[in-house]
Image (cartoon, rainbow, N blue to C red):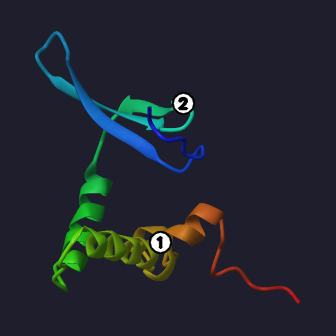
Amino acid sequence: MPRPVPRNRVWGCDLLTKTDEQGQPHIALAILDHASRACLSVAEWQNGRVERFIGTVKRELAREPVTDGNEVATALQEIRTWYNHERPHDHLQGRTPAEAWAGIDVFAAKSG
């Protein structure tokens, strides 16, 4: 029996392919919450942004060797924190993903 996990903490994802009548494959991404088994998304998948993100992660991982899975997990968490909270993105008008997610306009004049 799987151990219980809190909702919205662990997600599973996978891709599927459906070929149309013209022989063109269409890729769909499914995302499920492990705890509730709720389907968070199932949609046709365009992965350019994710591929760019994976490239960024690979470049950052290549900077230092790791000796085991614990070090990989630690490095991935550090990269995630850096990527979301420290690294401004050109396509987000200089905001970090965390700022964009929260709706923060870092360039708005502060009143007070």
> Residue 39 in the image: x percent, y percent?
50, 30
- Residue sitting at x 54%, y 41%: 4
| Mark 2–mark 1 CB contact (< 8 Å) | no
Q: Within the image, what quadrant is residue 38 found in?
A: top right
Residue 41 is left or right of residue 71, and the answer is right
Q: Nearer the viewer, mark 2 or mark 1?
A: 2
Quadrant of the rendering where the N terminus is positioned = top left
Q: Nearer the viewer, residue 9 or 98?
A: 9
Residue on which the image places disc 1 = 84
- Residue sitting at x 19%, y 79%: 66
Residue 98 is left or right of residue 18, and the answer is right
Amino acid type indicated by mark 1: Asn
**Residue 21, above or below 29:** above
Q: Nearer the viewer, residue 109 or 72?
A: 72
Q: Residue 38 shows which numbered tag? A: 2
> Residue 87 in the image: x percent, y percent?
43, 80
